[in-house]
Amino acid sequence: MDKLFEGKTVMLSGGLGDIGRSIATEFARQGAHIGIGDILPESGATQFLEEIKNFGVKVHYCQLDITDATAVQNWVIDVENELGVASLIIANAATVTIARIHEITPEQWARELRVNLDGAFYLTQAATARLLHHNQPGRVVFVGSWAAGSVHAHIPAYSVSKAGLRMLCQCMALELAPHQILVNEVAPGYVEAGLSAGIWGNNPGLKDISREKVPIKKIISPQSVARQVIQLCHPENEHMTGSTVLMDGGLSLLT
């Protein structure tokens, strides 16, 4: 069976997190070479990178701070030189601070917006510029959140950053549409990954409470998010751009 992305190149930020690893694995399974960026040192990624290579694809790893625009631009060029022009661009790197409006510090607020919003902009701006330079079509997917459209008093910086990400997605989609570069967002609800997974792991009762809040009574796996990203990048997706795929199990339907 032919693989969906045989010979294509993916760029993925936050590639060593739970969702990032799942996205990288799914793309590798479908034949794509992968440029992975993360703030963690490569020594902590060796085993995972070998697992990816076992799919018969090439992998480029870069330790970088996604908020450093120059470092991101250099990463994009390095991936292009080693793996080819990245036509599949996944902005996934994110951080979250649990702190209400009068609890969060200016430093925490600034850092969260820089990682979640500025970093996503730097990656997608630099990578799509290379697509324009080579006159190639492509796909961009922002890993957003249902929090972009629903008030979360305990994570205001995260919610604001994801709301900004949604508008960035729409602005970029409109500008790049004539060049056949489609830009979309996947917006998960409760995912068993990252901070949530850590909290639930220490207190399974909270996970049960969260699951009961979801109308379909299910928590999302990182693999489910990855499969939705794959769908947005599917070669047969020729018309969807500027859209948000909300996969929250109905959470946003609650009042």
Image: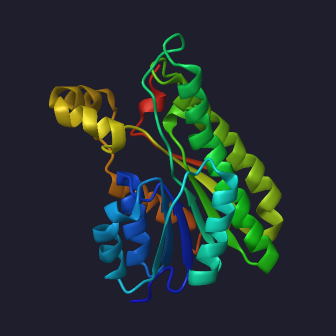
Residue 41, quarter of picture: bottom left
Q: Is residue 110 above or below residue 52?
A: above
Residue 11 place in picture, x, y as percent: 56, 67
- Residue at 61% of width from left, 35% of height from top? 113
- Viewed as shown, does residue 80 lie left or right of 250? right
Q: Is residue 172 above or below residue 138?
A: above
Q: Is residue 222 above or below residue 132?
A: above
- Residue at 65% of width from left, 78% of height from top? 85
Residue at the bottom extreme, as displayed: 1
Q: Is residue 231 visible?
A: yes
Residue at the top extreme, as displayed: 102
- Viewed as shown, does residue 82 lie left or right of 242? left
Front-most of residues 173 and 40: 40
Front-most of residues 59 and 208: 59
Q: How many marks?
A: 0
Residue 126, quarter of picture: bottom right
- Viewed as shown, does residue 251 lie left or right of 107? left
